[in-house]
Amino acid sequence: MARSTVTSSADSQPDAAAARRYDLVVIGGSAGGIEVLNLLLGALPECFAPAVMIVTHLPPDSPSYLVHAFAHRCALPVIEPDAGEPIMPGRVHIAPPGYHMLVEVDRTVALSTDPAVRFSRPSIDVLFESAAVVYGERLLAILLSGANDDGAQGLAQVRALGGTAWVQAPDSAASPEMPRAAIERGAADSIYHPATMARRLAALPAFL
């Protein structure tokens, strides 16, 4: 039976997933998503336990500025990983331009030059789907502002395999098409405005 969708962004709304423990947080965004990523990453404490992996849609033929930009706002180490690199707790992994970033079964990073998905490489769907297979219920996936439907299918896979899916409220997104596509597909557990999402993410429990 399909899981129901929670559609509240109110601070007072209880969220059963808030008490869950995660090994990995995957985040995808496109147009308008960088601003929200700055807010989310800036809210993370130094003791944040899960690994973080991020895909954004960037031109493939220009170097990414995101590692440098996010490192100034985030208390955690921010890297652009190499293929085969372990996915480390308490570290932010940014997909390099022009490569799909995937999760291997041994919890290492894979980089691929396979064809674009939803006109994008890196693809949010590719990351979300591969992470869901490996991490299952220990995965939290977050979809932010964007102008296409990349990420909706991946979020559905996350939920199908027991993980948790958060989506940015479309009325708070510079480009609402991406979060709206996920919501219309029934792929969201919770829908949050950015400030609420940042607080809930920062408050996730550390590992025992």
Image (cartoon, grey):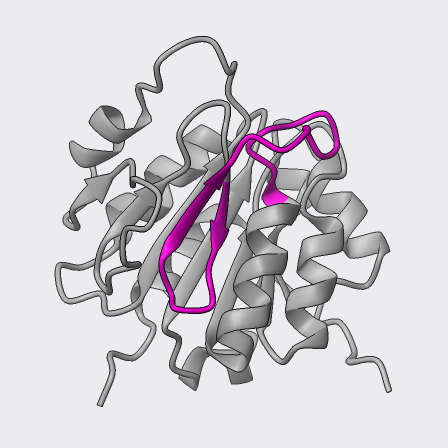
User: Would residue 11 be visible to someone looking at this image?
Assistant: no
- Write the residue at 16% across / 32% down: 72
The location of residue 208, given as percent across then percent down, is: 22, 90
Is residue 127 shown left or right of residue 6? left
The residue stretch that appears in magenta:
101-124
The location of residue 159, given as percent across then percent down, is: 68, 72
Q: Quadrant of the N terminus?
A: bottom right
The location of residue 110, given as percent across then percent down, is: 44, 48
- Indicate yes or no whether the magenta region holds residue 72: no
The location of residue 82, given as percent across then percent down, is: 30, 39
- Indicate yes or no whether the magenta region holds residue 107: yes
In this view, 88 is above or below 127: below
Residue 19 occupies which quadrant of the picture? bottom left
- Write the residue at 36% across / 73% down: 23
- Write the residue at 35% across / 14% down: 63
- Write the residue at 52% across / 62% down: 131
Is residue 158 shown left or right of residue 113? right
Question: Looking at the image, which is closer to me, 120 or 74?
Answer: 120
Residue 122 occupies which quadrant of the picture? top right
In this view, 110 is above or below 135: above
